[in-house]
Image (spheres, rainbow, N blue to C red):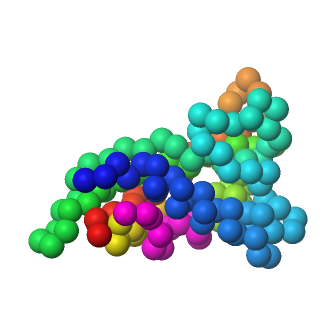
Amino acid sequence: MIDAANPVQAAIYAALTADTGAGGLFGTPALINGVFDAAGVPEAQAMPYVTIGYFDSGPFRTFAKNGEDLQATLHVWTRTRGFKSGNAIGGRLKALLGDNSLTVAGYSLARSTFLRSNNVPDPQTDVEHIVITFRILLGET
């Protein structure tokens, strides 16, 4: 079994950054200022942006294939009062990744479904944080 985290992260990144149409994450006007690894956000990155990470995984087996049952967490970061902006971004993430197929290197099946969303206000700052979790079932080629 191959490690799925890196190819899944690459597939999610590709899906999000390709969203350039009207109302898209990178449309005109853009909803976000970038997509980053959770551990690699540039020091002075302007909000709003999305981070990819963290992953939680376990085995996924059918009669014919082995694979992985992975939960991928995306984080929406905004600097606004209230969650209206962040919820709009979260809605777009759900439209792109919820109940959709992904192209993941090394896997013939990669089905993504939306699991849950959690709004996390920071009472000390004007940063709003939304955590969105997707379940991705992966079948090896």
Is 20 on the left-hand or right-hand side of 96?
right
Residue ID at (69%, 58%):
89
Question: Quadrant location of the C terminus?
Answer: bottom left
Q: Where is residue 123 in the image (x, y as percent from the top left)?
A: 70, 27
Q: Where is residue 40 in the image (x, y as percent from the top left)?
A: 64, 36
Is 88 on the left-hand or right-hand side of 3?
right
Q: Quadrant of residue 140?
A: bottom left
Residue ID at (64%, 57%):
90
Q: Quadrant of residue 107?
A: bottom left
Residue 58 against residue 21 in the figure, above or below: above
Q: Is residue 114 magenta?
A: no
Residue 111 against residue 129 in the figure, above or below: below
Residue ID at (53%, 66%):
97
Q: Where is residue 116 in the image (x, y as percent from the top left)?
A: 47, 54
Q: Where is residue 35 in the image (x, y as percent from the top left)?
A: 68, 50
Is 60 on the left-hand or right-hand side of 63?
right
Where does the magenta region start and end?
A: 94-106
